Amino acid sequence: MLQRRKRPVGLRRKGIVESYIHGGGRIGVLLEINCETDFVAKTDQFKALAKDICMQIAAANPSYVSRSDVPAEVINHEREVLRAQALNEGKPAHIVEKMIEGRLEKFYKEVCLLEQPFIKDPDKTVQQLINEQIAKIGENITVRRFTRYQLGEGIEKKANDFAAEVMAAVKK
């Protein structure tokens, strides 16, 4: 008899993959949100949370789930850009580092889902929304990953220089 290998209990994930389509099919989101039991994953409350987070992703277009997901090279590049901006504004060097840290916090709030203001209640972040649901449900909830699609995104439009084409044709 063939025996199935069991995964360690700590690695079993429960939850759902939620989808959301917005703008007449112009934007689509897939979200994996995890919890501890199938019972919770099947509740309307959990599904509503997943749908709200999908709407957040569609509207705010985050790049990462949390700041720990932002690659070091992205952070370093952002720091250099912010440093150049601050120096171009003529700020003293001792103030520049504080400005960079403040602007980096703003950067995280723009690109990290959990740090964004929640679209339905901007007075709280998405993480605070999740924490409220954790308190109500009594179970840990985590956003594992998401993908956002936008119609036409990534398709490079060929730039046509009509005048140059006409001149090239005339010269032949």
Image: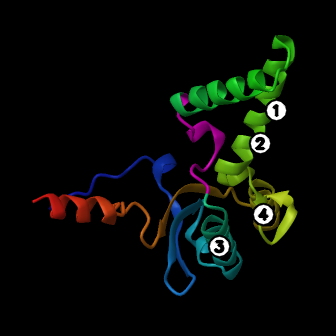
Marks 1 and 2, Cα distance to the nearest angstrom? Answer: 7 Å
Q: Which residue is disc 4 drawn over?
A: 118
Marks 3 and 4, Cα distance to the nearest angstrom? Answer: 10 Å
The answer to whether the residue labelled 3 contacts the one labelled 1, judged by CB atoms less than 8 Å apart, is no
Where does residue 152 sit, x and y in percent of width and height?
42, 70
Q: Name the residue at 66% across, 27% down.
A: 79
Q: Secondary structure at mark 1?
A: helix
Q: Which residues are magenta?
A: 62-72
In the image, residue 24 lies in the stretch drawn in magenta: no
Q: Secondary structure at mark 3?
A: helix
How many labels were placed on the picture? 4
Q: Name the residue at 60% across, 57% down.
A: 143
Marks 4 and 2, Cα distance to the nearest angstrom? Answer: 15 Å
The type of residue carrying mark 3 is Met
Mark toward the start of the polypeptide (3 vs 4):
3
Quarter-of-image position of residue 127: bottom right
Q: Is residue 25 rendered to the left or right of residue 53? A: left
Q: Secondary structure at mark 4?
A: strand
Disc marking residue 106: 2
Q: Is residue 111 visible?
A: yes
* Mark 2 surroundings within 10 Å by alpha-carbon count, few (fewer than 14), some (14 through 19), many (20 or more): few
Mark toward the start of the polypeptide (3 vs 1):
3
Disc marking residue 102: 1
The type of residue carrying mark 2 is Lys
The answer to whether the residue labelled 1 contacts the one labelled 4, judged by CB atoms less than 8 Å apart, is no
- Front residue (pair 17, 163): 163
